[in-house]
Image (cartoon, grey):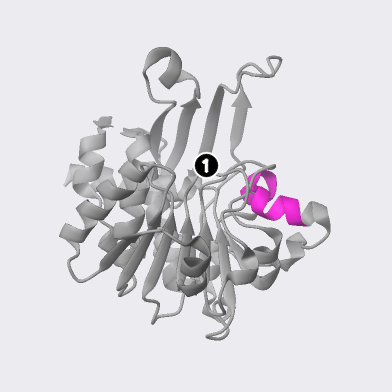
Amino acid sequence: MKIISAEQVHQHLNFEALIPLLKQSFSRAFSMPQRQVLALAPEQRDNHDAFALLPSWNEDVIGNKMFTYFPNNAEQYELPGLFSKIMLFKRQTGEPLALVDGTSVTYWRTAAISALASQLLSRENSRHLMLFGTGNLASYLIKAHLSVRELKKVTLWGRNSAKVNDLLGEFSSLYPNVTFNASVDVNAEVANADIICCATGAKIPLFDGNIVSAGTHIDCLGNHMKDARECDTTTVTRARVFVDSLTNTLNEAGELLIPIAEGAFSKEDIIGELADMCKRPALLRQSADEITLFKSVGTAISDLVAAYQVVQKVTE
């Protein structure tokens, strides 16, 4: 059984290969039971420590992503709040294949799924990406979206100006033909964006859905809580809504659960899951003017596909 490090994950993954591989994998048969996020101290109101299990399998491999979430680690122990591993087994025999670093895989597959959704739903002539969030995912998201659309402008919004400036410097050098700007007027920038990608820890909506322009594609991936959301009810009701997984989003995503509780939206209004998007092109964008929204909370099958790709490359 191989032990695959984060360095090996970064060495062997690239968006040009991973995005079409994920599209192909979501077009084929797979199984993905609902994930379990287990509170480790449910009796303690202020303790949010958790352990999660995310199983999935396809015709090639069985996987289980496991992660621990200890939000007080940084303050108490100067450690990351999240640790993750992905265990893979051969589908044919059940033999253990590898233990893969899960944190690095999560960055790659999250950004790849975001870009895949944009490739399927945003207008082909989209030129302006507005990215909310400057955390660990930001650089992956920028690279992934630039790999599927000929973007000419990227606007970065973040609460930490130093992180915004670091990203501006890094990507202005990497992509000299793209203009990178820091956000100065959210209303104007949202109104002029072709693609809006939200990857934050925001508890309340980041922008007013009334100012979103016709034809915009919106991607919300930062929130996993029932009582929080990155976009408002207006955004949801104005858009044709897609999700990565019905089971998981309807259990975790405030972006959908809050409008449902308000009576403004229903689960029947969701057009389809990512698997439907990959298999049924007729479901995708219907006109240049419609607003599309993709809500994701992460899928075990995307973890499995990305991790198995690394194992295959290492084995070669």
The residue tagged with tag 1: helix, strand or loop?
loop
120 with respect to 226 (left or right):
left
**Quarter residue 175 falls in:** bottom left
Q: Position of residue 278 (x, y in %)?
A: 49, 69
120 with respect to 150 (left or right):
right
273 with respect to 226 (left or right):
left
Mark yes or no: residue 63 visible: yes
Q: Residue at x 34, y 73 (%)?
A: 149
Q: Residue at x 42, y 48 (%)?
A: 158
Mark yes or no: residue 307 visible: no
Q: Residue at x 61, y 26 (%)?
A: 38
Q: Position of residue 143 (x, y in %)?
A: 29, 58
Q: Would you place residue 121 above or below residue 37 in this image? A: below
- The N terminus is located in which quarter? top left
Q: Would you place residue 125 above or below residue 48 in this image? A: below
Q: Position of residue 167 (x, y in %)?
A: 28, 50
The kind of secondary structure the magenta stretch mainly shows is: helix
Q: Nearer the viewer, residue 180 or 116?
A: 180
Q: Position of residue 65 (x, y in %)?
A: 45, 36
Q: Work out which residue is located at the far right of the displayed protein and give it.
A: 263
Q: Work out which residue is located at the far front of the displayed protein and give it.
A: 184
Q: Nearer the viewer, residue 218 or 243?
A: 218
Q: Which residues are magenta?
A: 248-259
Q: Amino acid at mark 1?
A: Gly
Q: Nearer the viewer, residue 51 or 196?
A: 196
Q: Would you place residue 30 above or below residue 74 in this image? A: below
Confirm whether the magenta stretch covers residue 254. yes
Residue at the spot of label 1: 201
